[in-house]
Image (spheres, rainbow, N blue to C red):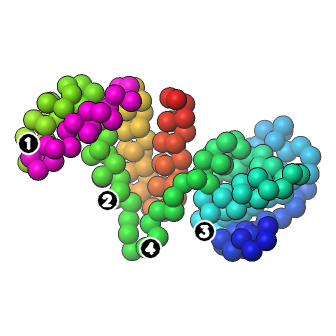
């Protein structure tokens, strides 16, 4: 791993026996498909920043011929190698521990609602809606949102808003803000990949 190994990002890395790994995962309520636990495996554990460890492992996999990322586990999700790669590319959010997810979620939801209005009625309807909402100073953004809206379908937008609503609920129910936002951004990235 060189200088930027798992320990540098508050993570750990162990070569594990498959039966022991399966047992440990089952003890935490996770069932892993048998085809994933084949061959020699090593396990990386993120003790703090999951995307940072994913980046270290995927970067190492690019340089080492005999090392590949097979899967990952984040919360209750079993991630494919492609999803681990997407997780590695997520920006580190909330670098200041005093911040919360509420502001970011509110801004994301506002933007997606504006996109929805632009999908339905274009820049004119969005400009009117912003004026009625007491935000006439944002009317200049209506054309920008209308251009962005062309890349969206109503069903995609609905799924994205549902993901944000669920993230908002999780952040208010005591799940950590960082974990909530990382899971939301990964889900949105996967949703965008599905649409492409």
Asked where in the image residue 190 lies, by quadrant, the reply is: top right
State the residue position of label 1: 131
> Where does residue 98 sit, x and y in percent of width and height?
39, 74
> Where does residue 8 sit, x and y in percent of width and height?
69, 74
Decide whether the magenta segment is chiefly helix, strand or loop: helix
| Marks 3, 1: nearer the viewer | 1
Of the image marks 2 and 4, the number of the one nearer the N terminus: 4
Residue 103's disc number? 2
- Magenta segment includes 87: no
Residue 23 in view here: no
Of the image marks 3 and 4, the number of the one nearer the N terminus: 3
> Where does residue 47 sit, x and y in percent of width and height?
65, 68
Residue 48's disc number? 3
| Marks 4, 1: nearer the viewer | 1
- SS at mark 3? loop
Q: Residues within 10 Å of mark 2 (few under 14, many from 20)?
A: few
Of the image marks 4 and 1, the number of the one nearer the N terminus: 4
- Magenta segment includes 146: yes
- SS at mark 4? loop
Q: Residues within 10 Å of mark 3 (few under 14, many from 20)?
A: few
Residue 149's disc number? none
Residue 97's disc number? 4
Label 4 near label 2: C-beta < 8 Å?
A: no
**Marks 2 and 1, how far apart in space?**
22 Å
**Marks 4 and 1, how far apart in space?**
35 Å
């Amino acid at each position: 791993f060189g200088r930027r190994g798992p320990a540098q990002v508050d993570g750990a890395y162990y070569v594990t026996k498959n039966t022991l790994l399966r047992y440990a995962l089952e003890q935490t309520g996770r069932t892993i498909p048998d085809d994933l636990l084949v061959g020699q495996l090593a396990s990386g554990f993120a003790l703090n920043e999951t995307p940072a460890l994913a980046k270290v492992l995927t970067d190492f996999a690019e340089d080492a011929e005999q090392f590949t990322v097979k899967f990952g586990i984040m919360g209750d999700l079993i991630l494919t190698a492609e999803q681990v790669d997407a997780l590695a590319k997520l920006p580190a959010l909330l670098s200041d521990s005093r911040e919360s997810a509420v502001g970011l979620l509110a801004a994301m939801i506002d933007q997606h609602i504006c996109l929805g209005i632009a999908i339905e009625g274009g820049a004119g309807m969005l400009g009117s809606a912003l004026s009625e909402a007491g935000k006439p100073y944002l009317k200049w953004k209506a054309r920008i949102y209308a251009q962005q809206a062309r890349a969206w379908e109503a069903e995609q937008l609905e799924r994205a808003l549902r993901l944000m609503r669920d993230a908002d609920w999780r952040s208010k129910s005591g799940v950590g803000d960082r974990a909530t936002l990382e899971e939301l951004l990964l889900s949105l990235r996967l949703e965008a990949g599905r649409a492409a």
